[in-house]
Structures are given as structure tokens and as C-alpha cells.
Amino acid sequence: MKLLTKELRKKLPPLYSVENEKDPLVICKFFTPDSNWTWYALEFDGKDTFFGWVVGFEKELGYFSLTELEGVKGPLGLPIERDLYFEPCRLSEMKAYHEKLEGDPLEAQLSVLKAKKIAGTLSQDDLKHAGAVLAEAVGELKDKMNDLAK
């Protein structure tokens, strides 16, 4: 699989062009199918260097290279792939998604709401869903407190 197509090269802004944006657009996603590493590209120098958000041992913004992505293999020997179904979205949405994966549903829900508000896509349905998540979490907390009181 070709990691970076001509179309994606055209869509990726040049390095340093979105550094002052509050919530930049993530253009593409690369991942290891046999591990938990993911690279979200925000910018590209047109040759080899990306700037983006890397999720691995830590989660951080930084630089990574196309050459490295093409040469690295995961623990089972599988190459890095590009997510063919990834839709560009705001960085805050990706951060919220990863928080949700880590298991704090309330913090994750709040992050999703903040991301949608920043992106201008917050809807009444989003708020209703967040209320349902909160109600469920409160119910679980009540159950745990009742168990402790026994």
C-alpha cells in the first residue's frame, strides 16, 4: 500500500502553516495493525517530514518522517498502513476519541462536546447523548455506593 498518495500530498498543508490554528485539521492517519501506534498528519513538507499528533507510548505533537513510516514494522512484522477510511477531522476530535478509548467516559464525553463546540458542530442530539452518558455513570456510582454501604 502506498502510504502517501498524490491526492493526500495536495491536501496536506505545508509545515508551519497551521501552527497558529487553535484546532487544526487532521488530514490522514497512519497506524500499526499489530500494535497501538498511530500517527495523525497535520502538515507535510512535500518531501519526507510530517508534523502531527503521535499516539504511542505517549501522546504528543511532533515530527515524523515518511521514510521511517515506510521502513518500520510492528511486532508481528506487519508494515505501517494508512487508514483508507479516515475522514479529515479536527485534532480536538481525535484527542477526545483517544480519551474515550482510555476508559473515562465522563471526561471523554466532555472532550467530545468541547471539540464539537470548537468545530461548530455541537447539536442538541450531542447534548442529549452526553446527558444519557452522565445519567448512566451516576447510576453506576450509586450502585457502587450502595454496595459499599452493605
Image (cartoon, helix red, strand yellow):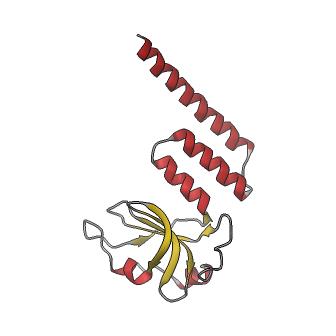
Q: Quadrant of residue 72?
A: bottom left
Could you say which is closer to the camera, residue 135 or residue 59?
59
Quarter of the rendering occupied by the N terminus: bottom left
Residue extending furthest toward the top: 150
Is residue 129 placed above or below 12 in the rendered structure?
above
* Residue found at x 51% / y 25%: 141
Q: Quadrant of residue 8?
A: bottom right
Q: Is residue 35 left or right of residue 139?
A: left
In x, y percent, where is residue 133?
A: 58, 35
* Residue found at x 51% / y 47%: 100
In x, y percent, where is residue 15?
A: 59, 82
In x, y percent, where is residue 19?
A: 64, 74
Could you say which is closer to the camera, residue 149 or residue 29?
149
Residue extending furthest toward the bottom: 47
Is residue 46 placed above or below 32 in the rendered structure?
below
* Residue found at x 59% / y 79%: 12
Q: Is residue 141 left or right of residue 114?
A: left
Q: Is residue 76 left or right of residue 92?
A: left
In x, y percent, where is residue 34?
A: 32, 62
Quarter of the rendering occupied by the C terminus: top left
Could you say which is closer to the camera, residue 138 or residue 61?
61
Count of residue discs:
0
